[in-house]
Image (cartoon, helix red, strand yellow):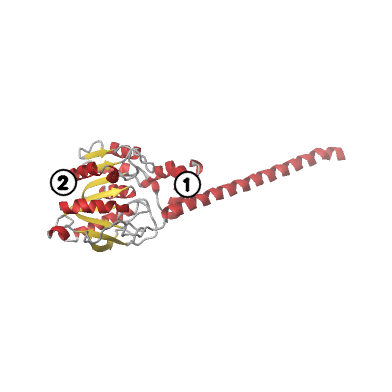
Amino acid sequence: MSQTSLQPDLTFNVRVKKRKKIIWSLGIVLLLVMALVFFISYKVIDTLLHHPRDTNVSYELNIDKTPYEEVEFKGLKNNNTIRGSFFPTSSLSGKESNKTIIVVHGYTSNRLVKGRTQKLIEHLVPKGYNILAFDLSSQGKSDGDLITLGLNEKYDLLGAVSYLKSRDHTGDNIGVIGFSMGAVTSLLAASESDDIKAVIADSPFRNAGLFLREGLPFFSGLPAFPFSYTSTWMANWVFKVDLDSISPMDAVKKMQDKPVMLIHGTGDQQISYKNTEIIYESLRDNASAEVWYPLNTEHIDAINHYPTEYFQRVDRFLDEYVGK
C-alpha cells in the first residue's frame, strides 16, 4: 500500500481523536459546572435551614409590669424540648381563665416576635386571655438544629396545645396568632387539630417550594434557573425537608368550618400579599374565613402600622370564636 493511500486514514484518525478530546473536555466542564451548581445549592439550603438563633428573649419585654411563668414542654416530633413563657390573666385579676392565645413567631425570630408579643400581652391579657409564647425548634432557647419552614414546627405548636390541655382548663379554648413562617405553622397545625378553635395568620407564604423558587433571586442574588430547582431538590435529598409539601394553600382546604383570619400588608416586600390571596381562595367555602389587606404595610407590621384597627379586628374575631 502506498504512502498516499495511508494519508486519508491518518487524517481521519487524528480528527476522531480530536473529537474525543473535545467531548471529554466538554464532559469534564459540564461535570464541574454541575458540581458547582449543586455545591452552591447545598450552601444556600444549609444556610437557610441552619440560621443563627435570636436568643434575646428579653427584647422589649417589660418584666416588672408583665408577670409570667417560664415553661417547657415536648414537641410532638423529635422529642425536642420547647421553651416558652406563659402569661396568665390571674397575674392581673386573680382569676383563672380558660381562654388562651398561642403566639407563633417566624423565621429567625423568637417568642417575642421583635416586640409584637409584648403588644399582644398588654392588650389581650387584661381582656381575659392567657398568652403562651414559645420558641420554635432550633430558634430562641428551644432544642433542635434544623429550621424546616413549618414542616416540623407544626409539631412544636401541637405540643404547645397538648401542654395547655394538661394545665387544668387553660386549654379549653385555644386560639393561635402566627406571624410569617409562624402563620404557616399555625395554618398547618390547625388543619390537624380540633383543639385549635381559631387561627389568625399574619403574612404567610402559600407554599414553601414555590416561595423559594420565586424568591431565591431576590434573597440570594442567584439566577432562578437552575438554582431555584436544585436548591429545592437539595433540601429534600440532603435534609429531608420536602418544601413543596409545606403548603398552607392546600392545608386550609381541610378547614372549611374553622374560623380563619388572614392579614397581609400590600407593601410586603418579603412575602407578597398575593400569597394570602391564593390561601384565601382555598377558603372560599368557609363562611368563617376573612381577610384584611392593610395598605402600604410591610411584612407582619399591621400591628405597628394600624394598631387601632388591628386590635379592633382581632378583638372581634377572638371574642366571637375563642372567647365564647
Characterize the local packing of mark 1: few (<14), some (14-19) or many (20 or more) Cα atoms within 10 angstroms. Answer: few
Point out residue 249 in the picture as x, y percentages from the top left corner: 32, 41
Split into 4 quadrants, where in the image is the N terminus?
Answer: top right
> Residue at 79% of width from left, 42% of height from top?
10
Point out residue 2 in the picture as x, y percentages from the top left corner: 87, 39
Residue 198: tell me if it is visible: yes
Q: Is residue 155 left or right of residue 42?
A: left
Point out residue 227 in the picture as x, y percentages from the top left corner: 49, 45
> Residue at 28% of width from left, 54% of height from top?
157
Characterize the local packing of mark 2: few (<14), some (14-19) or many (20 or more) Cα atoms within 10 angstroms. Answer: few
**How many numbered marks have been drawn onto this rendered protein structure?**
2
Q: Is residue 76 left or right of residue 212?
A: left
Q: Amino acid at mark 1?
A: Ser
Q: Amino acid at mark 2?
A: Asp
Q: Where, by quadrant of the figure, is residue 288 drawn? A: top left
Point out residue 66 in the picture as x, y percentages from the top left corner: 22, 59
Q: Secondary structure at mark 1?
A: helix
Q: Secondary structure at mark 2?
A: helix
Q: CA distance from mark 2 to mark 1?
A: 42 Å
Closest to the observer: 119 or 104?
119
Q: Which residue is mark 2?
A: 319
Mark 2 and mark 1 residues within 8 Å of each other at the beta carbon: no
Q: Which residue is mark 1?
A: 220
Closest to the observer: 320 or 56?
56
Q: Where, by quadrant of the figure, is residue 95 drawn? A: bottom left
Q: Where, by quadrant of the figure, is residue 75 drawn? A: bottom left
